[in-house]
Amino acid sequence: MLYVKKANLEDIEKEWAFVRDMPEDEFYLRVNRDNPASLKVMQKNGGRIVKEDDEHYYVRIKK
């Protein structure tokens, strides 16, 4: 189990390096309304809901 967590951490670090090097100042994301855990992760990382409809929340996160 520890190996899986370590592998996931390494993947996340690689992805973050990719995102960090992108020229965008803000990221636009969409999450299903029936996925509150992902929405909470986005919000804990500075995300704010800018729009919502019957199926999704639309979130912006500043870099």
Image: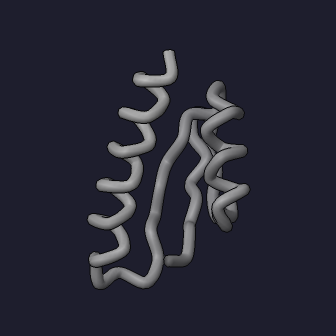
Q: In this view, does 28 lie above or below 22?
A: above
Residue at figure coordinates x 61%, y 38% from the top left: 38
Residue at figure coordinates x 44%, y 34% from the top left: 6
Viewer-nearest residue: 52 or 2: 2
Q: Where is residue 24 in the image (x, y as percent from the top left)?
A: 35, 81
Image quadrant where residue 40 sits? top right
Residue at figure coordinates x 38%, y 61% from the top left: 16
Viewer-nearest residue: 6 or 16: 6
Point out the residue furthest to the front here: 2
Q: In this view, does 50 lie above or below 9?
A: below
Image quadrant where residue 47 sits? bottom right
Viewer-nearest residue: 55 or 35: 35
40 left or right of 19 in image: right
16 left or right of 35 in image: left
4 left or right of 18 in image: right
Q: Where is residue 25 in the image (x, y as percent from the top left)?
A: 43, 84
Residue at figure coordinates x 55%, y 76% from the top left: 62
